[in-house]
Image (tube, rainbow, N blue to C red):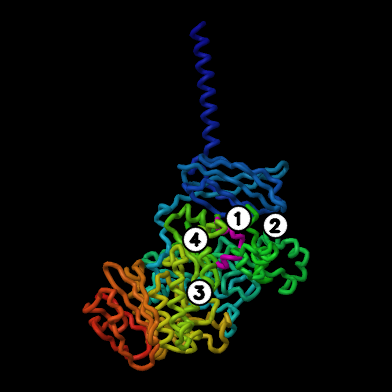
Amino acid sequence: MRNLKQLIICLILLLVFACNSESTSSDKASPQEITEINNDLDRVEPPHWWTDFKNDALQLLVHHPNIGSYTPDISYAGVILTKVIRADSPNYLFLDFQIDAGTEPGKFNITFSKEGENDLVQTYELKEREKSAIDYVGFDSSDALFLITPDRFANGNEANDSVEGLNEQGTDRSDNYARHGGDIQGVIANVDYIKNLGFTALWPQPLLTNDMKEGSYHGYAITDYYNVDPRFGSNAEYRALADTLRGKGMKLIMDQVANHCGLEHWWMKDLPFKDWVNFQKHYEENIDNWNWQTVKHSSHRRTTNQDGYASEIDRISNNQGWFVATMPDLNQRNPFMAKYIIQNSIWWIESLGLGGIRQDTYPYPDKQFMSNWAGAIMTEYPNFNIVGEEWSYNPLLIAYWQQGSKNKDGYNSNLKSTMDFAMQRLVIDGIKEDESWDKGLVKIYEGLANDFHYASPENILVFPDNHDMSRVFTQLEGDIEGTKMALSLYATLPRTVQVYYGTEILMNDFEKPGDHGLIRTDFPGGWQGDSVNAFTGAGLTDTQKDMQKYVSKLFNFRKNSSAIHSGETMHFAPKDNIYVLVRSNDEETVINIINKNEDAYELDLSRFDELGINDKALRNVQTDESITWSDKLVLASKGSYLFTTKN
């Protein structure tokens, strides 16, 4: 009898153990169990994610009719649904997940249930990261960035010039504000051209969807943060561009926009919260009569970010006002918006293997959010780099935004790089102005002296021009030698440097200075049938070919000059229309002599004895001629004389 009882007890225990095992197995689905892909919902963003981030949190934005009345559930080992947040709109849910360290990559279903309704099922994927976080190396002072406007660079696929279903149809190359048809395939086809010029990184203006009714060829009115504009190509082609650049030892810089979106963004027709965009109530009250007159514009008074005397209304006007009526100002103080933007940036870094981010209109969003945004990225990717656009000619303001700056208000931006509009203008003024005690080359000399205020001047991005300002050749009023001098200075300053496409062939906006559509002119040869082809040189003038050669020599030299990348800097106060900038390390000394004298000038070299290069052989970077640095140096004419001790 005792044996029978023991047998029954054992059978019961075995049954209980089996049931528990079966239950555990169903609660922890393995990656292999999901074979059918379900996509019942309109949108889930991010559309996928990865395992093994330092930050184990993930927040999904779910958009679908009346989804707020459904209850979600998941079953996957290592993934916990920690919180479900219902928005003001019934068509949203925000789902907070915790992804434990060591969670296996794979797919799992999110099931949305509601009494009396069929379940909605969305399959979600966690991918394995392609490389370690420390291997995401950002651009630095060894890099030279080539900026392009993709719509105006090269048309590699005419089939996507017009895409059915989008608001703006067709192309018109005679209209500077219409789409012209440039695309990602056109860029890929001409990466070698960019590389051969000596550039090590490519910065295209935004390539994400801008489904606006007109005038959004530039890319800054984003209507879908997770998809490439089909007129540029696809997400796969964007990745192909990144891979092509990587294969040639180059980096891809992504132009991102955290401040605003495009008015035709899908969420503008169904905003999740009452404070998703700034001045949202005003927008909704005036939606039927919305134009440049009714919008509450940004004041553009960016100094309110630093000004201890600024009124609150002025701060709000700068940070919360809309850029233009067609660009809603995103409210980064809303925690769900903040999380959305941060995750979107990380998603693209992982998806493309980025070599950096350029963040548009940096002083316009909520500045504490911008610190959190940059901090979140740099925490995940400690060797990465981000440059923020601060259009200011005041070095104090530029320095404020750089990580390591000792700001009086205690603000730490977590931003490694910012844009040097101050030095950009000083170089132009220094070359254009007639020499006097306080004008001309002294502007450059004193401007560079301001570097004492920067936490790391070599991480600041300098440039001769960009997509928002007159071409450098126009700024210098058609002065070819002046343009060469400017380029040589930008390339040898203790900075990272960026050049806008077409500078190498003297593209200009003389016809209508400052006009954005003209500044962003089509690059000749990027379209079939172009009579001039700058990629091959066909049809270029001798002057354009000479400038192209000059730029190639200059930046291919810079690419391999460790003295320029990380050397010490010394300069000599302007004298007799001449300014001398020196970069040096143990391996090399680089000397840039900027000479504004029109006639031949004999330079006394005894002034430069402290450089310690007397009687050494130097090579002229542009001509490859050798000189001996001795008593005198004859400068034949106006121009930049760039020498190196490295042969």
Q: Amino acid at mark 2?
A: Asp
Which residue, given by chain and number where applicable, does mark 3 sit on? 422
Task: Return the mark for residue 338.
Answer: 1
Give the amino acid at mark 1: Ala
- First in residue order: circle 3 vs circle 1: 1
**Label 3 vs label 1: CA separation?**
30 Å
In the rendered structure, find residue 275 and report the number of the disc placed on it. 2
Q: Position of residue 10 (x, y in %)?
A: 50, 16
Front residue of 239 and 278: 278
Few, some or many residues within 10 Å of mark 3 (<14, 14–19, 20+):
many
- In percent of width and height, residue 503 lies at 45, 81
- Numbered circle sitting on residue 405: 4
Residue 310 shown left or right of residue 195 in the figure: right
Front: mark 1 or 4? 4
C-alpha gap between disc 2 and disc 3 = 36 Å
- Amino acid beneath label 3: Ala
Which callout, 4 or 3, points at the residue further toward the start of the chain?
Answer: 4
Q: Label 4 sits on what residue type?
A: Ser
Q: Are marks 1 and 2 in contact (CB under 8 Å)?
A: no
Q: Secondary structure at mark 3?
A: helix
- In the image, the segment drawn in magenta is 360-371
Residue 536 appears in view: no
